[in-house]
Image (tube, rainbow, N blue to C red):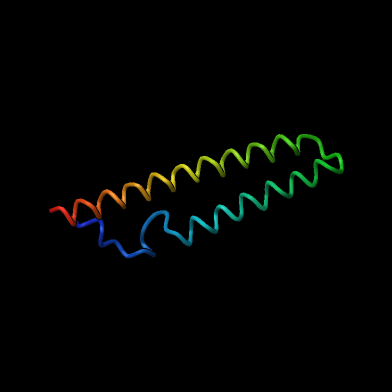
Amino acid sequence: MVDIRKIPTEEFPLNYYRYNHVMDELRDAARGFAQLDEIGWPGAKDLDKRLMKIWADLFGVWETIQETERQLREQAVAG
């Protein structure tokens, strides 16, 4: 079995750089729809809210990844 703690950062499915990039893109898109809402684009506010929900969900995923990494490090130290 592969020691998952040794996966290179760039090969991890959601690494710090990818996470930040996706979060920034989602936030920017949501802001764009919020601005479109201000000029009357139909449904823009709903799209802003939906994108921010995805943003919040991704934040939760990231927290889970971080917690798992902490647990793996603690196991390695204890073991």
Residue at left offset 18%, top offset 55%: 76
17 relative to 4 in the view: left or right: right
Q: Which quarter of the figure has residue 40?
A: top right
68 relative to 58 in the view: left or right: left
Is 67 drawn above or below residue 4 in the view shown? Answer: above
14 relative to 38 in the view: left or right: left
Residue at left offset 61%, top offset 49%: 26
10 relative to 50 in the view: left or right: left
Q: Which quarter of the figure has residue 33?
A: top right
Residue at left offset 51%, top offset 40%: 57
Q: Position of residue 37 (x, y in %)?
A: 80, 41
Name the residue furthest right.
39
Name the residue furthest left.
79
Q: Position of residue 52 (x, y in %)?
A: 62, 41
Is 19 drawn above or below residue 38 in the view shown? Answer: below
Nearer to the camera, 68 or 19? 68
Residue at left offset 42%, top offset 58%: 15
Q: Position of residue 79 (x, y in %)?
A: 12, 53
